Amino acid sequence: MSDQLKSILFTAVVALVCSLLLTGAASGLKARKLRNVAVDRQKNILKAVGLIDPDQTVSASQIEQRYAKNIRCYTLAVTGRIVDGEAGDGLPVCFYIKDGGAAAYILPVDSRGLWGKIHGYMAIEKDGKTVAGFSVYSHNETPGLGGEIEKPWFQKNFVGKKIVDEKGDFVSVGIVKGKVTDVIAKAQQPNYVDGISGASLTGKFLTGGLKKVLMEYEPLSEQFRKGAVDLPAGG
């Protein structure tokens, strides 16, 4: 066998081995990446219902265990029924299960931001009126300005706010420019949170996004307000 042929065979073998190694590494990393994405989603759902303190360090396994123990996810069908699995044009919804019943329901937030999409979760208490929590896990807003939407101090402002007015009519929850007590009449203050200084556009876009999401899930909220929620068997 000539030296030239040996060199070609050696190069081919090395290339094949490297290709196999890279393929294996990519497959392993993909699985790890998918798990990290799932765990981050679970973490933010748990944060929205207060099952994880934003300042608390929790391992991936602890998040998965806590999620499996407390959260159940279904689909809100166009008929208004809560069903297992996917249902045509239905909407995804998760429930915080406590003492055998739904203590809160969690809605995925997909809102426009100033520089891109804002993704998070909003939890509503079982009265169908009161915000239990809010979390953001993905955004492109400016650090130190609109980026403050990911900070605990901002997200905690939503806890206890109302998505209905004093008459019980749906109005959503919004973000003001400045402080609520300075710019909003007292009767409407339960429906607003303080804005972020220098990020009024982020607040404006997120306000619109939250209203759109809450309006889509209003049939479910009405069921909770009437105490007529029926989870699938085993939920």
Image (spheres, rainbow, N blue to C red):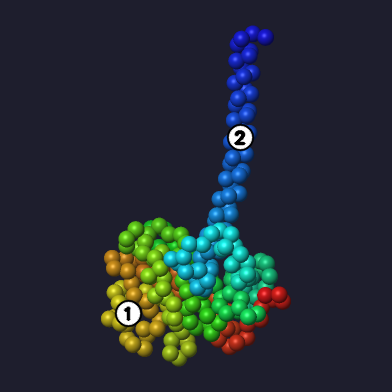
* Marks 1 and 2, the one that precedes in the sequence: 2
- Could you tell me how many numbered marks the image carries? 2
| Residue 231, numbered circle | none
Closer mark to the observer between disc 1 and disc 2: 2
| Nearer-the-camera pick, 143 or 164 | 143
State which quadrant residue 181 falls in: bottom left
Q: Amino acid at mark 1?
A: Val
Residue at left offset 30%, top offset 73%:
177
Q: Viewed as shown, does residue 217 lie left or right of 153?
A: right
Q: Is residue 122 visible?
A: no
From the top left corner, tell me how far across and down residue 202 is, in percent: 36, 65
Q: Secondary structure at mark 2?
A: helix
Residue at left offset 60%, top offset 70%:
71
From the top left corner, tell me how far across and down residue 188 is, in percent: 37, 85
Q: Looking at the image, which residue sits at the far top?
A: 2
Q: Which residue is mark 2?
A: 21
| Residue 180, numbered circle | 1
Q: Looking at the image, which residue sits at the far right?
A: 233
Mark 1–mark 2 distance (CA, rounded to whole Å): 58 Å
Q: Is residue 196 visible?
A: yes
Q: Looking at the image, which residue sits at the far bottom?
A: 167
Pick the quarter of the image with the N terminus. Answer: top right
From the top left corner, tell me how far across and down residue 107 is, in percent: 53, 71
Residue at left offset 45%, top offset 91%:
167
Q: Amino acid at mark 2?
A: Leu
Pick the quarter of the image with the C terminus. Answer: bottom right
Q: Secondary structure at mark 1?
A: helix
Residue at left offset 61%, top offset 17%:
8
Q: Is residue 26 above or below residue 81?
A: above
